[in-house]
């Protein structure tokens, strides 16, 4: 992969390229952002660029160093992935021992540490010494979803690189070209991936089933507002099985209601679920604007209640009843 091929993160790419060209590379970086947003791929690309024998704004992708990076076979790039819940002091000791060994082929050694916020306090304090007294030509890249979980002393000794969500238009175009999809399908995937590249690729390739789950949730919504309340609780098992995905389910419902709202005002160009027009048309006549807004507000409060660990079953039962009552929210 080249910087020009990396989707999004334009400011980060410019910053890293400039730091190499001006020989202003830090000994420590924190790459922060949502899982799947591209932190590891960018770290690997940065490492490849640092070790490339012919770097000129891009790694050449032809030298022996680039070829070894592309095959995950470069002896001077070390990737640490926690095998357990925490990164222990023994793990950090091994990393430090490796850091103190000279590079094998290059003049630099690169260390990429995934889930770096999992370091125990003892491990983090041990690792801090390496950042305080860096070994020459060693570059350490810490990957994390939340840099606030790292020790402040580690945070303060690293360059912070924050990854942003990819613009939906750019992500849609990329998905459309890579997977040969029509524009509507690509837009749908880009929206449901929430700007996270890996999730978009997983949806497009079929390894993420959110689009199928979306249809299941739409069906539950349709049945909920048309059946009597005694039948509603047939869906309790579904919500129990998907307890860990309740945020995603609530998002799907809110997006559906958003589309119904836009359909009422004939703003079809803003509709996400354009493949479900029959359902949208049906509910433009069944729900008025006030009802839609009330349901959305209730769904948002449902999400908060679940995240606050309030009785899950009670929350779901109430949600189903509220959805059915609609106007009586």
Image: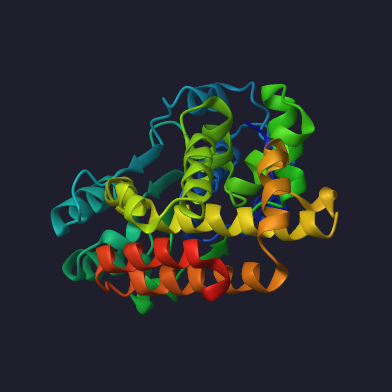
- In this rendering, position of residue 303 left or right of residue 297: left
Q: Quadrant of the N terminus?
A: top right
Can you give x and y, in whole percent of width and height, for residue 125 in the image? 23, 71
**Residue closer to the observer: 230 or 216:** 230
Q: Residue at x 18, y 48 (%)?
A: 84
- In this rendering, position of residue 270 left or right of residue 165: right
Can you give x and y, in whole percent of width and height, for residue 311 in the image? 24, 70
Above or below: residue 257 compared with residue 295: above
Above or below: residue 130 compared with residue 222: below
Can you give x and y, in whole percent of width and height, for residue 57 in the image? 74, 42
Question: Farthest left residue?
Answer: 90
- In this rendering, position of residue 289 left or right of residue 101: right
Asked which quadrant contains residue 319, the reply is: bottom left
Above or below: residue 47 compared with residue 163: above
**Residue closer to the observer: 121 or 237:** 237
**Residue closer to the observer: 119 or 195:** 195
Can you give x and y, in whole percent of width and height, for residue 216 in the image? 47, 40
Q: Residue at x 78, y 33 (%)?
A: 183
């Amino acid at each position: 992969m080249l910087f020009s091929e990396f989707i999004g993160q334009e400011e980060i790419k410019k910053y890293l390229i400039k730091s190499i060209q001006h020989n202003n590379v830090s000994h420590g970086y924190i790459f922060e952002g949502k899982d799947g947003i591209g932190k590891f791929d960018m770290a690997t690309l940065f490492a490849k660029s640092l070790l490339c024998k012919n770097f000129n704004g891009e790694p050449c992708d032809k030298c022996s160093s680039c070829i070894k990076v592309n095959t995950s076979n470069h002896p001077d790039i070390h990737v640490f992935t926690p095998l357990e819940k925490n990164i222990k002091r023994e793990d950090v000791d091994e990393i430090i021992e490796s850091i103190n060994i000279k590079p094998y082929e290059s003049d630099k050694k690169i260390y990429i540490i995934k889930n770096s916020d999992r370091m125990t306090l003892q491990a983090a304090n041990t690792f801090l010494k390496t950042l305080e007294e860096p070994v020459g030509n060693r570059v350490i890249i810490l990957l994390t979803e939340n840099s606030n979980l790292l020790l402040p002393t580690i945070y303060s000794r690293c360059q912070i690189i924050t990854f942003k969500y990819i613009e939906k238009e750019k992500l849609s175009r990329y998905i459309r070209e890579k997977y040969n999809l029509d524009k509507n399908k690509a837009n749908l995937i880009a929206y449901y991936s929430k700007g996270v590249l890996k999730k978009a690729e997983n949806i497009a390739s079929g390894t993420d089933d959110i689009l199928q789950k979306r249809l299941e949730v739409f069906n539950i919504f349709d049945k909920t507002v048309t059946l009597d309340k005694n039948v509603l609780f047939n869906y309790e098992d579904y919500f129990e099985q998907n307890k860990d995905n309740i945020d995603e389910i609530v998002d799907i419902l809110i997006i559906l209601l958003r589309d119904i709202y836009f359909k009422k005002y004939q703003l079809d160009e803003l509709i996400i679920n354009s493949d479900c027009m029959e359902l949208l048309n049906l509910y433009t006549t069944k729900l008025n604007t006030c009802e839609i807004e009330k349901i959305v507000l209730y769904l948002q409060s449902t999400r908060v209640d679940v995240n606050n660990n309030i009785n899950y079953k009670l929350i779901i039962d109430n949600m189903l009843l509220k959805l059915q009552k609609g106007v009586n929210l």
